[in-house]
């Protein structure tokens, strides 16, 4: 079902999710894994070959895809932060829409077969029933959500007109790498480590926190998976946790931290994933965030406190 016999191209393979996909693929996949990212270092390491390259440099993109004979593509290039996209919609368009057009065109010209693409829960927008399945109408409320929906349309266009198989994964809130991620859990832990109060706006809004390892599994199980061709699939834990729940979990590890409440800025709608398709088509079942988030906070606290102690020792002895 999951054919990984051909070379896999990971655009944006140096980023938060992409680098973790590459790390796991390197352990499991037989074929070559080709990383293409503006921030990659040029190197060859076992079955992973990395190219520093801009997705808008079409000549180089095509040359690398041809030379490395890639057939499956995972496109992790994008601007993932809602505030960053709101602040700079032109940049959001470039990275979330135009870059996808370039990857699709390169796939068309090199006869690559299958694209796995990260869309987002933000395409659903302000939903009335918080548990969302893939069939409800997407009504984004942010420019990030609209740009990702536009990218989904482009992909559908290339699938219909040029026969490129595609799997669109609508990823919810990812946690699991304190140093690379920008989400609310790590932001709260950063504040708690500094001893500053956590500010919660509203707090009742439900979100679906899904562990990075489960997101990576969903991407890897999609590659070359014919059951997932031309499918849109939610990637979440299937559990809704409120921001208040997250605040309380941070307090369990940092009992001296204060929480300051402010009125909500964007309404209190909640959203979490119906994960039936993820389970049946990709065979993935994510970790329950009521366990995973607690473990992540406690582990991050211990690691960061060790790092702070070690840097203080260096400073004293230096
Ligand atoms: N992080 C999340 O919680 C989340 C949730 C849903 C969807 N997504 C989507 O997943 C994708 C990856 O997210 P992430 O958090 O890993 O982002 P990231 O910013 O960590 O990774 C993006 C990568 O793309 C590379 N890149 C940017 N511009 C490029 C260019 N012009 N040419 C080549 N490479 C370029 C960057 O160097 C970076 O390594 C994005 O499309 C994002 O919208 C992320």
Image: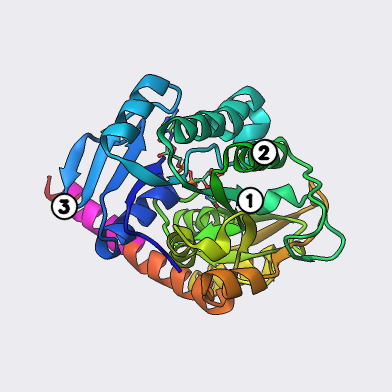
Magenta residue span: 304-315
Relative image position of residue 263 (x, y in whole percent): 80, 52
- Give the CA distance from mark 2 to mark 1: 9 Å
Q: Quadrant of the N terminus?
A: bottom left
Pointer 2 residue Cβ closer than 8 Å to ligand 1? yes
The local crowd at label 2, few if under 14, some if 14 to 19, many if 20 or more residues have their Cα within 10 Å, is many
Which residue is denoted by mark 3 in the rendering?
46
Which residue is denoted by mark 1 in the rendering?
120
- Give the CA distance from mark 2 to mark 3: 36 Å
Q: Earlier in the sequence, mark 2 or mark 3?
A: 3
SS category of the residue bearing label 1? strand
Q: Nearer the viewer, residue 22 or 111?
A: 111
- State yes or no: discs 2 and 1 in contact (Cβ < 8 Å): yes
Q: Earlier in the sequence, mark 3 or mark 1?
A: 3
Residue 49: mark in rendering: none
Of tags 2 and 3, the one toward the viewer is 3
């Amino acid at each position: 079902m999951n054919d990984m016999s051909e070379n896999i191209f990971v655009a944006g393979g140096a980023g938060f999710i992409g680098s973790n996909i590459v790390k796991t693929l390197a352990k499991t996949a037989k074929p070559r894994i080709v990383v293409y990212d503006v921030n990659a270092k040029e190197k060859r390491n076992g079955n992973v070959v990395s190219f520093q390259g801009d997705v808008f440099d079409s000549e180089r993109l095509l040359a690398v895809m041809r030379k490395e004979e890639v057939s499956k593509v995972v496109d992790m290039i994008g601007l993932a932060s809602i505030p960053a996209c709101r602040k700079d919609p032109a940049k959001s368009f470039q990275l979330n829409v135009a870059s996808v057009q370039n990857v699709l065109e390169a796939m068309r010209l090199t006869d690559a077969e299958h694209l796995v693409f990260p869309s987002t829960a933000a395409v659903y927008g302000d939903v009335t029933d918080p548990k969302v399945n893939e069939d409800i109408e997407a009504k984004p409320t942010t420019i990030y959500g609209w740009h990702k929906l536009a990218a989904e349309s482009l992909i559908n266009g290339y699938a219909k007109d040029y026969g490129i198989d595609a799997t669109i994964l609508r990823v919810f809130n990812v946690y699991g790498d304190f140093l690379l991620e920008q989400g609310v859990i790590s932001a709260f832990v950063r504040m708690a480590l500094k001893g500053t109060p956590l500010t919660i706006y509203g707090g009742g809004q439900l979100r679906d926190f899904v562990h990075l390892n489960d997101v990576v599994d969903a991407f890897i199980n999609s590659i070359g998976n014919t059951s997932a061709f031309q499918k849109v699939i939610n990637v979440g834990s299937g559990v809704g946790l409120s921001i208040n729940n997250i605040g309380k979990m941070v307090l369990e590890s940092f009992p001296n931290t204060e929480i300051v409440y402010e009125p909500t800025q964007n309404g209190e709608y909640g959203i979490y994933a119906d994960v039936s398709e993820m389970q049946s088509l990709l065979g993935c079942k994510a970790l329950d965030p009521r366990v995973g988030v607690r473990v992540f906070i406690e582990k991050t606290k211990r690691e960061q406190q060790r790092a702070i102690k070690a840097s203080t020792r260096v400073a004293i002895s230096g």
